[in-house]
Amino acid sequence: MSGPFGSSQLFGVAADASYTIEGSGLFDASKYIDRTPSSVTTDKLWTFSTWVKFAQQSTYPDDNTIISGWLASASTPYCQIGIDWIDQLALVTPGDTIALKTNRKFRDYGAWYHIVIIYDSDAVVESDRIQFWINGVRETSFATENQPSSSANSMLISTSYPMQLGRNGFNAYMRYSSLYQTYTALIEGTAYPASYFGEFDSNGIWVPIDISDLTFGTNGFLFADGTDIAAGTDSSGVGNNFAVGSAPTVVTDSPTDSGDYGNYCTWNPVEIGDPAAPTTFSNGNLT
């Protein structure tokens, strides 16, 4: 299915939300931020929430990574969340095992998607152990579903390797993402459904809400806007700042429409023109 379901960006238009997200960070080329925890309370229970607008189709099975935990010397991911080469959202666990992958295809390059992923391997109901929520609606149709065994670690949060935004892969084969990302949070120790991060407005459009009062946990973080992502600044109050490998570009592109912020037009990477001499876009499809 192309385009967001229940999206806050119908036809590429940003929503008039009561909460304003002040821009985003553009990951492209070799841009990334990362952090290696000094201690871990739990890797068996967490919630990840982000707003993302994809810029390029993946040309390699794991190009558009949203977040990953990856040991530099390992040839396969420990934990990775992203869009694969056929535009499906997947969570990949140790040994390159696909835990969950959607049937839905994310091919609307003019839309912002809100993605919430819950990992709770101690959930009694097995199908609740990994949950995908897209624009406020729980995803139930999967091309692949391999739920974790009881009490299994996800391997996202570890003292042995970093969590990364903007790239994945061990050093010899590093793969960089091409996407806009903002209002990104990790909650360690609590399973929060999508309703803790957004709401449907009077027009049935999914919009963000203030999440600063959530309990983020030991390794939780919040990048509230584009400036936070570019600087790796944690706004949760926990102080889990990320190191900046190569700073994402701060842009005014946002899921919310207020002042200078909004969902701006970009070139469509699917429209390549003459297949014999295809057009190549860069800089988040701006050029």
Image: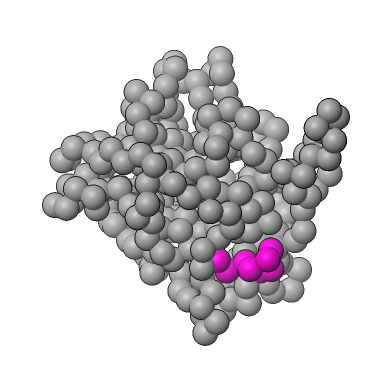
x then y, percent, for residue 60: 58, 27
Residue at (67% x, 41% y) in the render: 56
In this view, the residue in front, 193 or 147, is 147
In this view, the residue in front, 25 or 119, is 119
> From this viewpoint, is residue 28 visible?
yes
State which region is magenta. Answer: 7-14
Residue at (66% x, 62% y) in the render: 254
**Principal secondary structure, stretch drawn in magenta:** loop
Residue 11 is inside the magenta segment: yes
Q: Quadrant of residue 13?
A: bottom right
> From this viewpoint, is residue 233 visible?
no
x then y, percent, for residue 31: 65, 35
x then y, percent, for residue 149: 18, 37
Q: In the displayed structure, would residue 208 be above or below residue 174?
A: below
Q: In the displayed structure, would residue 186 be above or below residue 85?
A: below
Query: Does residue 148 appear to the left or right of 179 in the view shown?
Result: left
x then y, percent, for residue 212: 44, 66
In this view, the residue in front, 243 or 92, is 92
Residue 227 is inside the magenta segment: no
Q: Quadrant of residue 243?
A: top right
Residue at (78% x, 50% y) in the render: 267
